[in-house]
Image (cartoon, helix red, strand yellow):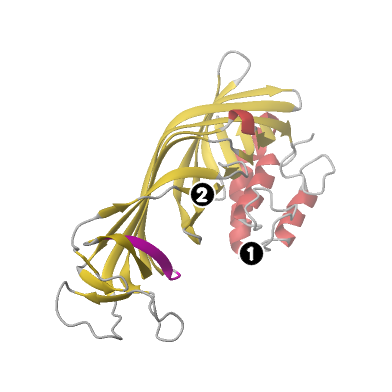
Amino acid sequence: MFLRLLSLVAASSLLFAAASAQLLGYDFTINSSSSGLTGELNFSADTSGTLIGNWDPDANATGTRTKPGLSGSFGETENLPVNAWLTLGLNDDVDTDATGRFRMLVDLDSGVAIVMGFRADYLGGQTLSIPATLTIRYDSFRTRQPSSIFVGGFPIPIPFGSVDVTVMEAAQNQPLAFGTVTPDGLGGYDVAVIVPTALTAEMTFLGNPLSLPGVPFAVPLVGKLAPNGSTATMQSQQPITFGQEIEIGQALPQLPLDIPTILPPGSTAHLLFDLTLDRIVAGFDGSTQMNANGTFVLLGDVNLDGIVDDKDLAMVLEAYALLGGGNPADINLDGVVDDADVTIVLMMFGAEG
């Protein structure tokens, strides 16, 4: 590791030592009132498993009993599972308020912009209620208590209200995201950085938590950077299209569901579903808006003495490979002190502020 760090120091010094006078660093806070996602959100969750009546000889002797098939014998204590599939679908036009932060370093000489530590809460701590559809498919079966037959083999929509989405967050999953910065001729700069992130979401479905694990989500941070003394603003509005299918294979908690009878109508079958979440499909088609206020920060000044020098480099090397947020040597805010932090110190070496 020591030899690798020496190589990194030597290479980075040659690349960046002369550029520190034209390097600007900012800590940005995303303004919720003018930032977020606007567009059409789609989500579906496919499950498979079995359904069975809620009958129990001791605890619920009057409960529903089930048996596959439409005819044949049906013993007085028979209660057998039936193959079943359940799909949850969400679709709605959304307009969210986002909160979050990111750190940016711009090298005006080389025309390079670097984004680090990007994190956005696209719900701004709120809950998003989205209209939902529930579709059930099962093999043909019959029931007792009530006595009925259910002809299967085709999807049946079930009336359903909405699902509450409680989390929708994007967190940068690469140490440094590189892009470009060019003067706009008006005293500001055009910045273009595609920030790789992992998107996570959580929702509540029939009382059960349902999670979208971190999936690749590219955030286009493309817009205007306007420095103003020790502050700056960053404005970006870009179209964004996202689609992802994720195989899950996770067993869900048993789901009780009442289904009205059809043949004959007028009663209710009380069923228990034992399902596995097979896959999730998520998509978004719209735009992302971001308006952020930034304050100047002397990136790499780990000891806060107003200059980036050998003392700061020593602190980063001493903390190398340490985990945990809040470490001042974790300059790129990714939770670990590593090559990316060494690189930033070397880029800024000799800078004062």
On the image, the x and y values in percent for residue 322 come to 68, 63
Q: Nearer the viewer, residue 242 or 251?
A: 251
- Which residue is labeled 1 in the image? 2
- Which residue is labeled 2 in the image? 164
Residues at marks 2 and 1, CA–CA distance in whole angstroms:
50 Å
Specify which label sits upstream in the sequence, 2 or 1: 1
Quarter that holds the C terminus: top right
At label 1, which amino acid type do we have? Phe
Is 284 placed above or below 69 here?
Answer: above
Q: Residue at x 51, y 60 (%)?
A: 207
Overall secondary structure of the magenta section: strand
At label 2, which amino acid type do we have? Asp
User: Residue 6 is drawn in which quadrant?
Assistant: bottom right
Secondary structure at numbered mark 2: strand
Q: Nearer the viewer, residue 29 or 19?
A: 29
Q: Which residues are magenta?
A: 253-261
Q: Nearer the viewer, residue 332 or 18?
A: 332
Query: Does residue 255 belong to the magenta stretch?
Result: yes
On the image, the x and y values in percent for residue 315 come to 76, 56
Quarter that holds the N terminus: bottom right
Q: Is residue 248 left or right of residue 225?
A: left
Front disc: 2 or 1: 2
Q: Residue at x 28, y 80 (%)?
A: 80
